Amino acid sequence: MSVDIQSIARQLDGAALHRQAVQQFAPGSFTLAQAYDIQRASVACRQARGDTVCGIKLGFTSRAKMVQMGVDDLIWGWLTRHMREEEASTVELGKYIHPRVEPEVCFLTRRDIDCPLNALEAVDYLEAVAPALEIIDSRYQNFRFSLEDVVADNCSSAGVVVGGWSRCFDALDNAGVLVAQDGRVTLAGSTAAILGHPLRAVVQAARLVAAAGMSLPAGSLIMAGAATAAAALAPGQHVRGEINGLGWVEFFTG
Ligand code: OOG
């Protein structure tokens, strides 16, 4: 099947840039492997504008997310520096299409990851862990997509707010996770929802990166995937995420 990878990548990049959602592609328009090629080409469009890769994110590591979005496999995409938002800052929602927030565990790597790892080895490769909030923003109308569509769209990556770093890896086992918007709890769950334990996301990240013939340099972020479904964001909100034993992270929306 001949697929114009560059043209689809430019369409998705343009949708993000101009905040104009596109329709999901017709089923069978491209394979999953081609979707990852499109993803890389769309990240290259960002890099051509001076952005740089700072890590990766996993998606659909929890049942809650799979059920919410109607897909059934783990996916991964790239995080870039321009997606980072400062903690406790005001995030302008005008730069997104239809942003949603989800609570996440974020890891910082301390060694290059270029081979598959098991969960015990994974900790050796990590510098720190932090509570985080991910802002996702599908470039598809109504957040409707197939697994291939969402991979091509860099897994809806849009914004990342990371809280304080610690080495509390022991706190990750079945820790309570909450998101409150203006003081009202809108999302609640447990870190156990993330593949049973968030460290397994690091194992999966290492496997996926190695399988793609790439490596993740020391100092990269790994977002483990949401523990709960995502909630819509609206302007003028205070958004706070908390992971029991790890601490909390917050931002405001403008
Ligand atoms: C896709 C991104 C999924 C997660 O943490 O599972 C994701 C989406 O829901 O738009 O970020």
Image (cartoon, rainbow, N blue to C red):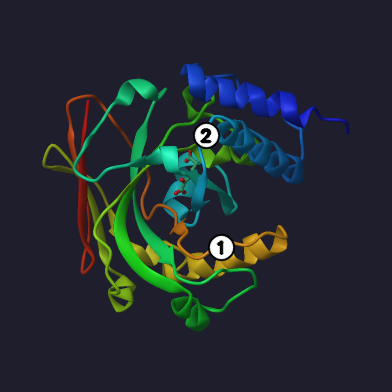
**Of pointers 2 and 1, the one earlier in the residue sequence:** 2
Quarter-of-image position of residue 83: top left
The response on whether ligand 1 sits within 8 Å of label 2 is no
Q: Element at badge 2?
A: loop
Residue 26 visible to an observer of this rendering: no
Q: Residue furthest right?
A: 1
Quarter of the figure with the N terminus: top right
Task: Count up the numbered dots.
Answer: 2
User: Callout 2 environment at 10 Å: few (<14), some (14 to 19), or many (20+)?
Assistant: few
In x, y percent, where is residue 189?
A: 30, 57
In x, y percent, where is residue 216?
A: 57, 61
Quarter-of-image position of residue 247: bottom left
Residue 164 is left or right of residue 123, and the answer is left
Q: Residue at x 46, y 58 (%)?
A: 222
Task: Give 29 or 66, whichever is nearer the viewer.
Answer: 29
Residue 166 visible to an observer of this rendering: yes
- Whole-Å distance between the Cαs marked 2 and 1? 25 Å
Give the number of the disc on residue 205: 1
In x, y percent, where is residue 172?
A: 32, 71
Q: Residue at x 52, y 19 (%)?
A: 21
Height in image: 175 above or below 65? Answer: below
User: Callout 1 environment at 10 Å: few (<14), some (14 to 19), or many (20+)?
Assistant: many
Dot 2 corresponds to which residue? 50
Callout 1 amino acid: Ala
Residue 130 is left or right of residue 48, and the answer is left
